[in-house]
């Protein structure tokens, strides 16, 4: 299986921030509906192409994207998969996982509890555990996003910053690895979370990895209570600089709606957290504070997934958050 990152210019998003002459959007589009697949292929291929590979794979998923990728890859490899998800997972995601041929178990209220069950199943039933974000091979897969963006942008096309959403930190780790591989350690990373699903921001404020008391955000795909250790270490190293920022659920939802209206692409709330940095004026604010250059070279925005959203789910979110 091979996948290529699609990089495209969006004039409407560019015009939102006057100090940005051009806006680049990076999107990895697959038939699973999210960009986790290339990373999961890298992880599952060495893990599952062994004599024990006839056993099912168990995966715990933060809201569905990682689980969707694992279910998709397992189906393509002809392997059974068991996906463990928390009760906060929308039925839309459960149905889509089942459509990929996966057995779905719903355990716990948040991802951390589902993850504990997946680890238990791996130990007691001899299944192969595929983590959703905390593994070097997953980071290597995400790093390819930067390499492909660099190839598309060409010589002299280095972005001014990379903008992405953070859940457990796997995408962040991969993008940082990709920036280092490309020699772009002077490119800052703007790491966006929603209030109530902000484990990276909480760790940075505490100066150590911490566990959130609960996940209260509607951006369920960002719903890890604890960020992975490697992501926290990157936040402390300063190469590249990580700017951790938060938006409200309302701002993330509005970004989803605006992106749908302007670009005709429906993404989920987790992705809306990154897009909200532009639509809410955060990028311009960071420039005015001197935390980002002004003017800024092209901004690379990672549009990361849409497996847990449809028009019905969008309507439900609007009723909850715009009342």
Image (cartoon, rainbow, N blue to C red):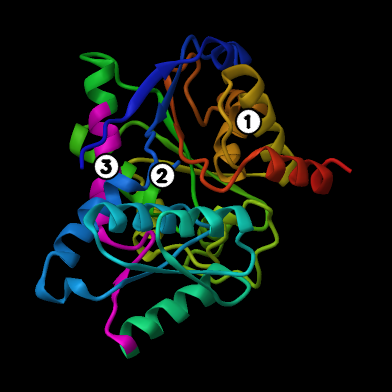
Q: Are marks 2 and 1 in contact (CB under 8 Å)?
A: no
Q: Nearer the viewer, residue 139 or 156?
A: 139
Counting from the top left corner in percent of width and height, residue 41 is at 24, 52
Using a 10 Å C-alpha cutoff, classify the residue at mark 1 as few (fewer than 14 neighbours), some (14 to 19) or many (20 or more). Answer: some
Quadrant of the rendered image containing residue 95: bottom right
Q: Secondary structure at mark 3?
A: helix
Q: Which residue is mark 2?
A: 32
The residue positioned 84% from the left and 40% from the top of the image is 322
Q: Which residue is mark 1?
A: 282
- What is the CA distance from the residue labelled 2 to the residue labelled 3? 19 Å
Q: Quadrant of the N terminus?
A: top left
- Between circles 1 and 3, the one closer to the viewer is 3
- What is the CA distance from the residue labelled 1 to the residue labelled 3? 25 Å
Q: Which residues are magenta?
A: 125-148
Counting from the top left corner in percent of width and height, residue 188 is at 40, 34
Residue at the outermost right position: 323
Q: Is residue 142 magenta?
A: yes
Quadrant of the rendered image containing residue 55: bottom left
- What is the CA distance from the residue labelled 2 to the residue labelled 1? 31 Å
- Between circles 2 and 1, the one closer to the viewer is 2
Identify the mark nearer the N-term, 1 or 3: 3
Q: Which residue is mark 3?
A: 143
- Between circles 2 and 3, the one closer to the viewer is 2
């Amino acid at each position: 299986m091979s996948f290529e990152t699609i990089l495209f210019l969006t004039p409407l998003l560019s015009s939102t921030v006057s100090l940005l002459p051009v806006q680049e959007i990076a999107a990895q589009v697959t038939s699973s509906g999210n960009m986790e697949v290339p990373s999961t292929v890298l992880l599952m291929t060495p893990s599952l192409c062994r004599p024990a590979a006839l056993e099912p794979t168990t995966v715990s998923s933060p809201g569905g994207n990682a689980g969707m990728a694992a279910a998709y890859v397992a189906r393509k490899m002809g392997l059974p998969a068991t996906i463990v998800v928390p009760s906060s997972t929308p039925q839309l995601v459960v149905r889509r996982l089942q459509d990929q041929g996966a057995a779905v178990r719903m355990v716990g209220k948040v991802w951390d509890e589902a993850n504990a069950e997946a680890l238990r199943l791996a130990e007691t039933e001899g299944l192969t555990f595929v983590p959703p974000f905390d593994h070097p091979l997953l980071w290597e897969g995400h790093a390819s996003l930067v390499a492909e963006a660099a190839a598309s942008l060409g010589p002299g096309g280095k972005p001014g910053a990379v903008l992405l959403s953070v859940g457990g930190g796997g995408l962040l780790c991969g993008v940082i690895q990709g920036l280092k591989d490309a020699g772009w350690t002077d490119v800052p990373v703007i790491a966006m979370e929603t209030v109530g699903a902000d484990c990276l921001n909480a760790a940075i404020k505490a100066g150590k990895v911490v566990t959130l008391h609960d996940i209260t955000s509607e951006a369920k795909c960002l719903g890890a209570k604890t960020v992975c250790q490697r992501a926290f270490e990157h936040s402390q190293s300063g190469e590249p600089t990580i700017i951790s920022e938060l938006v409200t659920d309302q701002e993330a939802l509005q970004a989803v709606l605006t992106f749908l209206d302007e670009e005709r692409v429906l993404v989920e709330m987790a992705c809306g957290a990154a897009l909200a940095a532009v639509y809410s004026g955060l990028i311009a604010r960071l420039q005015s504070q001197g935390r980002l250059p002004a003017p800024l070279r092209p901004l690379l925005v990672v549009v990361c997934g849409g497996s847990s959203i449809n028009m019905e789910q969008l309507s439900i979110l609007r009723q909850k958050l715009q009342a």
